[in-house]
Amino acid sequence: MEERLQKILARSGAGSRRTAEQYIKDGRVSIDGAVVTDMGIKVDPAVHEICLNGRSIRLSEEKIHILLNKPAGYVTTLSDPQGRPIVTSLLKGIAQRVYPVGRLDLDTEGALLLTNDGDMAQRILHPSFEIKKTYVAKVTGVPSREKLDQLAKGIVLEGRRTSPAQLMVLQQTPRFTIIQIIIHEGRKRQVRKMFAAIGHRVLALKRVAYGNLQLDNLPSGKFRILSKQDLEKIFSGP
Ligand code: URA
């Protein structure tokens, strides 16, 4: 993202914005090798090399953690060759370069964490932390108790057994059933594949919580910045 040069310099620890302006006036700052003395210039530090006194500046960004209610139809990659909308386009006003922690399918909606905090992302994704993820799935027909028990105990998907899951039927009609399912893994299309394995197609899928951090009533397409307490909720509880 483009920002004023003096602001970028200040963020790099070069001094206050006023000091940074003085450096620019003094001809001590260059962009891609060319000295700049123009105060109004805007530049994207991710694209251009900014040097102070001939040395490249380093920017340490403030860590940010975001919870987005992803709408269906958005991809969780940072670019899409097919031109489909990307989740980061929904983060209006966020200057940091954040990326999604894990993925949600194009058709899946709900809780998606985005951050620039690599350590936190690693902790959330690493299977050893076993962060529980809660989904609400609308599936075709009425799965029997036995079939749901199979999913709860673990089934073999692509040669590997899924770890135990918790399932709770929330609503049942002759045509579809709405089920809450809690899993601790993050295999590709896992929930869809689990239900397909017992003969019930997922018609709609929403992730409603990471650990004990609930999506609650965050509207679709909206996001909020997480506090330290929110982050603790991700790792807390059974
Ligand atoms: N399981 C799925 O099948 N899809 C998702 O997007 C997330 C979990």
Image: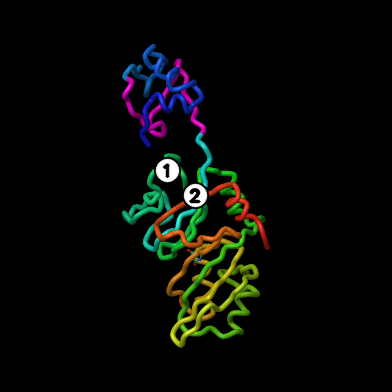
Q: Quadrant for the C terminus, please.
A: bottom right
Given contact means CB atoms under 8 Å apart, are the residues at marks 1 and 2 in contact?
Answer: yes
Label 2, residues with CA under 10 Å away: few <14, some 14-19, many ≥20: many
Amino acid type, label 1: Ile
- Asked if 68 appears above or below 118 in the picture, the reply is below
Label 1, residues with CA under 10 Å away: few <14, some 14-19, many ≥20: few
Image location (x, y in percent) of residue 235: 64, 55
Image location (x, y in percent) of residue 125: 58, 54
Whether residue 226 is in magenta: the answer is no
Decide whether the magenta segment is chiefly helix, strand or loop.
loop
> Which residue is found at the position 51% from the left and 43% from the top?
64
- Asked if 221 appears above or below 226 in the picture, the reply is below
Image location (x, y in percent) of residue 170: 53, 77
Spot the residue most to the front. Answer: 217
Whether residue 52 is in magenta: the answer is yes
Q: Which mark is residue 94?
A: 1
Task: Return the residue nearer the eye: 134 or 44.
Answer: 134
> Which residue is found at the position 39% from the left and 43% from the top?
93
Q: Quadrant for the N terminus, please.
A: top left
Task: Return the residue nearer the eye: 88 or 217.
Answer: 217
- Asked if 109 appears above or below 95 in the picture, the reply is below
Q: Which residue is mark 2?
A: 66
Q: Which residues are magenta?
A: 39-60
Report which quarter residue 237 is drawn in. bottom right
